[in-house]
Image: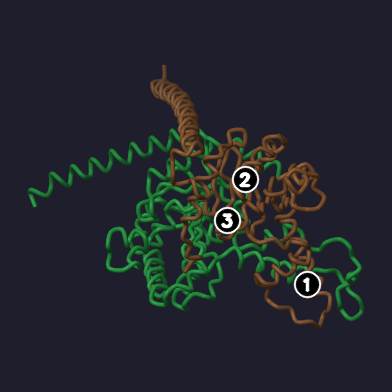
Chain colours: A brown, B green
Amino acid sequence: MDPVAESQKFFRRISQSSNIMLFLLWHVVHLILSVLYIVREIFRAIENYLITNGYVKTYTNLNLDRVKYLGIVIDSDEARNTSKVVELLEWLSALGVKKLCLYDREGVLKKSKAVFMERFGSTENSVAGPLVSKKRMDFEFVSITDGKEAVAKAANLLFKKYYVDGDSEKPFFTEAHLTDALKTLGAVEPDPDLLLIYGPVRCHLGFPAWRIRYTEMVHMGPLKYKKLGLIMKAIHRFTKVKQNYGS
Amino acid sequence: MEEERPSGVISKWLGGLISTMRRLLFTFMSSGPIPQHIAFIMDGNRRFAKKWKLDDQSAGCKAGFPSLLSVLKYCYEVGVKYVTVYAFSLDNFNRRPDEVQYVMDIMYEKIQGVLKEMDMVNRYGIRVLFIGDLNRLDEPVRLAAEKAMEATAKNTKTYLLVCVAYTSSHEIPRAIYEACQEKSLALPSSAKNDDGIVNDDDDDDVIKVVDLEKHMYMGVAPDPDILVRSSGETRLSNFLLWQSTNSLLYSPKALWPEMGFLQVVWGILKYQNKCYYLEKKKKQA
């Protein structure tokens, strides 16, 4: 019996056992984390109840003047549930939001555009008559193709403008050049002031990069668990934010 | 001297115990996916100075440096390969001149400090990169930064990317410019007419997204898995807007000088909990 080999075998077994133990412990900790998320959802539901039933006076008079342009990011899988999206838009419309940018990565919301425009749009095409037109909203529908690919198209526009003619001056491109090129391609809407993210994770999922420089991004949780009270809280908090813009 | 020795032994023993427990915790966390790249917006230095009534608000920047070292240590110990920090934005040049100069002086002092400890930096295999429009920096700072980059160029174990004079609003148009320059030189002669002018007839776009990403300042590293902004603010302030498409955004309430072990561990645990979803989104892209 070789004692060195035996002790090596022994320590290898201990190491394998401790690795298994650590792995199991890791899963236990993440199970606890998932339970904590559920507990947090319960507290948010209670908070939502208190806010929507007027027990918390802070959020009763929302000042929407600061929220000139509201952005909504929705996970594409959740965006397929059109009725949930319509319900969300009804709440936003009731709160008095006038201008809205709806983003989902795969463009699912773009495909349902007609449904939303019919119900809430402020154009002449909307079916609802003047009596129901008091809470109309202006919409913009955005997807991943309006992000990095739009910048690449703008780059090609700038390339053709400044590099086609060999003698023309080739300036160092600045933000102004990019903005003008994007405007030519039809990207004329302003940057959203506030972005509400509906999905499992706080992640903007590719919202056009140049439009979220100073945008506040708030995670609202999955769309299926959306809560009106928490939208009011997010908007109220946004109105209290003081930005220095770097200075 | 006799009275000092027992407390020195105790603090050494305690330090060793804390270090061992931390290593055990990091080993346990390594049972799950560890983020490859974490980016930090070091926000809250001035509020920290105000909170603790320091001499002036610039002193908050000095108070933030030990936090930076701690956070880097914990990230590298747990296995994160790339750490990016937002040290100075192009927008920050709009601050009071004395405040800007103070930050430049601290940067110079700290870079000089790193250059003095180059043996240790190289032993840990840290490659330091300064990302941004370095021509906007004071010349001594720029030269020191270039020296630090050159001295650590051969290291490949871990990376520290320090964003100075950086904004995404500058990075993206600059990448377009660099891509245009590259494409203009690389075009075959058949694409140009006899006067050397590029033909406009070609319908295919010359510049693709990959060309732009190659020329981004941050093209040297993969996209961040987690983007952390201290002090609880929820905006990105023109930082890594292009690169954060699939990043978990985490905003702990701690001001930057208060950031440390707890926030790093909690951020990584949150990432591990949502990693499956984030990886799914990356693959869909």
Q: Is residue B157 visible?
A: no
Counting from the top left corner in percent of width and height, residue B38 is at 51, 50
Q: Nearer the viewer, residue B198 or A202?
A: A202
Task: Say which element carries label 1.
Answer: helix
Q: Please state which of residues B156 and B56 is positioned toward the viewer in this rendering.
A: B56
**Residue B217, image x and y in percent?**
60, 63
Which disc is residue B185 wearing?
1
Residues behind callouts 2 and 1 on a single chain: no
The reply, left or right, for residue B280 in relation to residue A111 is left
The local crowd at label 3, few if under 14, some if 14 to 19, many if 20 or more residues have their Cα within 10 Å, is some
Q: Quadrant of residue B42?
A: bottom left
Question: Which-is-in-front pick, marks 2 and 1?
Answer: 2
Q: Is residue B17 above or below residue B205?
A: above
- Residue denoted by label 3: A67
Callout 2 amino acid: Leu
Q: Which residue is mark 2?
A: A92
Q: Residue at x 40, y 60 (%)?
A: B119
- How much space separates mark 3 and mark 2, taking CA atoms? 12 Å
Q: Residue at x 54, y 66 (%)?
A: B166
